[in-house]
Amino acid sequence: MADVQRYLEKLVSLAHPEGGWGYTAGVSIHPEPTCLGILALRLASERFAEPLESAQRALEAQANPDGSCKRRNDREEAIWPTALALFVHAASGRPSAILDRTAAFLLSIKGQDPDDKQAAEIHDINLKIEGWPWANGNFSWVEPTAWACLALRRAGLGDHSRVRQGQELLLDRAFDDGGINYGNRFVLGRRTEPIPGPTALMLLALQGGSLERRLSAAVEYLAGRALAGDDLQHLCWAKLALDCFRDHPAVGQVIDQLDDRILKAYENRNAQPWLAASPILESLTALALANGERNPFRLESNAQANASTAEKSDPFNRTLPFVRKKAWSERIASAFRGLAVEAVGRLRPVTPSTSVHIAKADKYGDELADTLHRQYESFRDRVQLAGKRVVLKPNIVEFHRDKVINTHPNVVAAVIELCRREKAEEVLVAEGPGHWRNAEYLVEESGLGDVLHHYGVKFVDLNHDEPVKCPNLGRLTGLEYLYLSRTVASAEVLISIPKLKTHHWAGATLSLKNLFGTLPGTCYGWPKNELHWRGIDNSIVDIALTRPPDLQIVDGIMGMEGDGPLNGTAKHLGAMIMGSDPVAVDATCCRLMKLDPERIRYLVLGHHKRLGLIKAGEIQQIGESIASLAMPFETVPHFQPLKMAQSA
């Protein structure tokens, strides 16, 4: 217990003054790190009685009268922490009134059926099975469904039909050969990959039942992945989940080795100067290293208590609307605000011409910094870096050793060099991946972590950053507000650093599509699927109008063609592209790929919304000519370009 207390003491030192925890020290309280912190402190409840009680009060302060639980300044629909709160309330023996109210709300929420022919065509999962969404009014996903099943079982509602259906959803979305991700096994005929975190939560939600084939395969996947990796978060969740399957033949020897690997991973993480202290990881480390019999996620037999009476009870059987309906006065006010946004958009100043610089760059060598500095000479007057707080937003989506998916780390290094030469006051690198919650893993595996370590630059996980409610200055999605990460919203200079790629729905993914990663996953979930279903082109333009990037630097040395952004083929273009007009930069990149930008829907929308210029005659090309470097990039049949008449 002495070793575990080390992590608990560190956890307490990171607490918010009012109790509970945010995702890092010094930020607002969030239910997720607070829930995990409470579970961890319960390992030594007598020693940490005061911070434990303070954390309990902080969690209950996040509760709403309807039983939901969410951070106060989060998006109204982001109700996914309710399941975590219910689990902790049940584990902590809180009064039945709190349990009943929280359980009633959780049972009232269900994932929406996409009811879309396209959805059925691109997925191989049963979209009719009801689980739980990240945000009210959205679709069912694995992690919120797993937490809901786990919490309701812990509260004695394991036989409720919603729990049984949620467990059915988890098995439906699991891979035959092991593991699960956030919900999609195949997309457009391409297999996706399992992820350790969601797999661990799925196993916890399904523990104690018959060892169905996919469940057994998931145990084997997680056991193998745990020994093959050294990521602290993955290792901790693997230990906690595998501990509930000790009788499985794949677990016995593996689980005995995990403690040493967790200890080494913890020390390695602490040695990384680019990472901030994490209350969640302190909690998980303590929980994983504690004696297996004290695993708070292991369900006792009474957690599967019969819930037939609850199902008959109206409070547990009510269904809330997917999105709260606004009162007529709110609707009128919203309409007036929409008119004001439209008026502002019509008055948005657009210069009659702009410049984009294309530089030849054949490889990711040391000379990249000099190349970018020469390019920047053309934009210094418009985008000054000296004395500014600069946020660099690369494109880090997933990591596969054999695929060219992400912005190359040497490009990020060259941009950091540029900022240093220009005497920027502060430089941060920030990203909010849409497919993986564990951004630290992606940064480390992609090689970006080495760059951050070398330069002493901090990394900010935008998915867990403080949300800032901003008026949506595009309104194409129908959303009145967007929630941006505070790091991006407060940046004096925002630089978008995408990888040049084709995209199976948008046609191309460049500096504008890269902005999806500026919206916190805590508000929109993983993946940020709601934004796609509201129209990927609409979302791209809405985000860009609400917080436009100030400078674009596109990694076009090695691009991707075909089924991007993940499954395409690497293609060498040998160019770096820079500009201060995001539409013009992306249009130029399209021309370098021999794609007509005036047939790319989001570029046309952006042009019409006065976000930037698209026509070749309005864009002065500096440096290399398009003709000297352009080569055809293949797209896929799923991409439907605008008809020529529409793009006029």
Image (tube, rainbow, N blue to C red):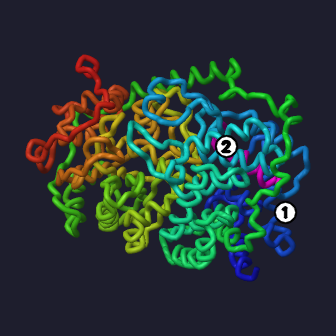
Label pair 1/2, CB-CB below 8 angstroms: no
Q: Does residue 183 lie above or below 366 as drawn? A: above
* Residue 167 badge: 2
Observer able to see residue 85:
yes
Q: Specify the amino acid type for callout 2.
A: Gln
Q: Specify the amino acid type for callout 1.
A: Glu
Q: Viewer-nearest of labels 1 and 2?
A: 2
Viewer-closest of 521 and 327: 521
Tell me which label, 1 or 2, sits earlier in the chain.
Answer: 1
Q: Residue furthest bottom?
A: 2
Q: Residue at x 54, y 30 (%)?
A: 479
- Which residue was labeled with disc 1? 53
Observer able to see residue 62:
no
Viewer-closest of 106 and 52: 106
Q: Does residue 72 lie above or below 535 as drawn? A: below
Instruction: Pinpoint residue 514: horizontal percent, then vertical percent.
Output: 39, 46
Q: Quadrant of residue 131?
A: top right
Viewer-closest of 440 and 376: 440
Q: Residue furthest left?
A: 628
Q: Residue at x 26, y 37 (%)?
A: 635
Q: Does residue 558 lie above or below 549 as drawn? A: below
Q: Residue at x 79, y 28 (%)?
A: 318
Instruction: Pinpoint residue 125: horizontal percent, then vertical percent.
Output: 52, 36
> Relative to 348, is 218 on the left or the right?
right
Q: Which residues are magenta?
A: 73-90
**How many other residues sit within 10 Å of disc 1, few (<14), some (14-19) or many (≥20)?**
some
